[in-house]
Image: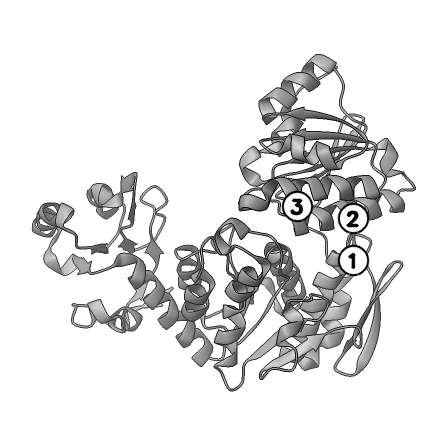
Amino acid sequence: MIKGADLLGCRDLKTRPIVPEHQYRIATDSRKINGQNLFISLYGPNFDSINFIPDVFSKGIEKVILESRDVNKDKINDLKSKFGPENIFEVSNVFQLLLELGNIRSKRFQNERGILIGLTGSNGKTTNKEMLNHLLSVFGEEEIWSTQGNLNNQIGVPLTLFELEDRHKVAVVEMGTSFPGEIEVLAKCACPKFGFITNIGHAHIEFLKSLDGVFEEKSALYQEIAKREDGLFLVNGFDEFLMRHKGKPNTQTLDASTFSFTNDGFQVTLNGKTFSLQNDTLLGDHQKLNMGMCLTLLSIIFPDHVDEFVEKSKSYRPPGMNRGEVVTLGDSTFYMDAYNANPNSMEASLRSYAAYLDNKNKSPELATFILGDMNELGEKSAELHKEVGKTLSELGAKTAIFVGRFAKDYAKGFSGDSKSFTNVAELKSYLVKLQTLPKEAFVKGSRSLQLESILDITVR
């Protein structure tokens, strides 16, 4: 929720007829108005919500903010005539307004003693957000707010900040990128006091060109935190790129001196005290490290609650949304991780699955590995898919199904038996004709493939 005073803090709205004390709930989707009273009209190549302004007023919207453009001046004049000029606010750039207003809301939240944590990284952002949410729930779930769904871009981050209310004490804001400079924009909008980068990998490398480019892009979060005298950025000391930040101002590092893996969990030193932790749902070392990072950051922010966080970590369970989710279908067990994929997350997930099988006293030789495309890898796509195929062989896999444009590249690196399909529809048709499903299966690929839909098929 924002205040009229927040709106008056924006350059294009300083002189508008707005009551500073008035409370506003913001909507940007005309189809999802439920108690909101301020509508910010967005547009894109294939839509323009200015066409739905009469509808939003009928649903209880009090005021509308929209961008003044040559193509819509007549429509704006008509709307002002019908609904009153005092209820239609024009701005020069509605997307810049979102970022500016998000920044104002974030600063007010933090000035009122709220804690804001920023997260980014090549993969694991949402997992770490969910881990932080779980640990922070020791304060009461009603006091915590975080990014919902995939609202981690230049529209989603401001919308996340607009939902902060007086009852919230901690906010966790996830930041994603699809082009150079986006993390800098998002970090400036959210201006977090605390945060970390999960890791540096080949995500979005088509646009960021190299791992050095990914590191530079993600490091904008550190640069923003470092501007604050009291800011703290936690360095993942197990990532060779992020280690470049070790020892810089406003940093603390989690590395082998404070964290180590054990057979059934990990050990972590928090505020001088070492804890041994076990949680059988943390499959793979990357998941254990994720929890270690979250525990370490929160122990710095809330040193009086370390024991509570440690105890809470034992009850963490991964959320659904096809992220490391075990699904049983008849006699078949699917390890679904079909939300997204890049080389780092693929390898980490494969190792998690190998650990899962080991915990069940099962061998990777008996499982079927269904891998879909990893997108946005640019000119390195073929090479990186082939490397994952090699990793699959190294883990002991003997049977695989590859789906998508790069299926044959996976197959070139894989030494076992494999089948390749151009798309998921072909795979589903094959499984239906086969009239059987794998007894044990690992499923992962980029979200666009919708690999999780194979669970919808019916076989005897």
Mark 3 secondary-structure assignment = loop
Mark 1 nearby-residue class (10 Å; few <14, some 14–19, many ≥20):
some
Q: Is residue 192 left or right of residue 7?
A: right
- Residue 348 seen in render: yes
Give the CA distance from mark 2 to mark 1. Answer: 8 Å
Around disc 2, counting alpha carbons within 10 Å, would you say few (fewer than 14), some (14 to 19), or many (20 or more)? some
On the rendered structure, is 432 left or right of 167? right
Report which residue position mark 2 lands on. 351
Label 3, label 1: how far apart the Cα atoms are = 16 Å
> Mark 1 or mark 3, which is nearer the start of the sequence?
1
Q: Position of residue 249 (x, y in %)?
A: 58, 84
Q: Are marks 2 and 1 in contact (CB under 8 Å)?
A: yes
Q: Residue at 51% x, 49% y: name it.
A: 206
Say if 293 sits above or below 66 in the image. below
Quadrant of residue 436 within the rendered picture: top right
Indicate the quadrant where residue 212 lies: bottom right
Q: Which mark is residue 15?
A: none
Task: Report helix, strand or loop for mark 1.
Answer: helix
In this rendering, which labeled residue sits more in front, label 3 or label 1? 1
The disc, 2 or 1, on the residue closer to the chain's N-terminal end is 1
Q: Amino acid at mark 2?
A: Arg
Q: Quadrant of the N terminus?
A: bottom left
Instruction: Name the amino acid, label 1.
Output: Asp
Between discs 2 and 3, the one toward the N terminus: 3
x and y, in percent, of residue 314 in the image = 78, 61
Badge 3 is on which residue?
323
Out of 280 and 336, give the one closest to the viewer. Answer: 336
Element on which disc 2 rests: helix
Which residue is the site of mark 1? Answer: 285
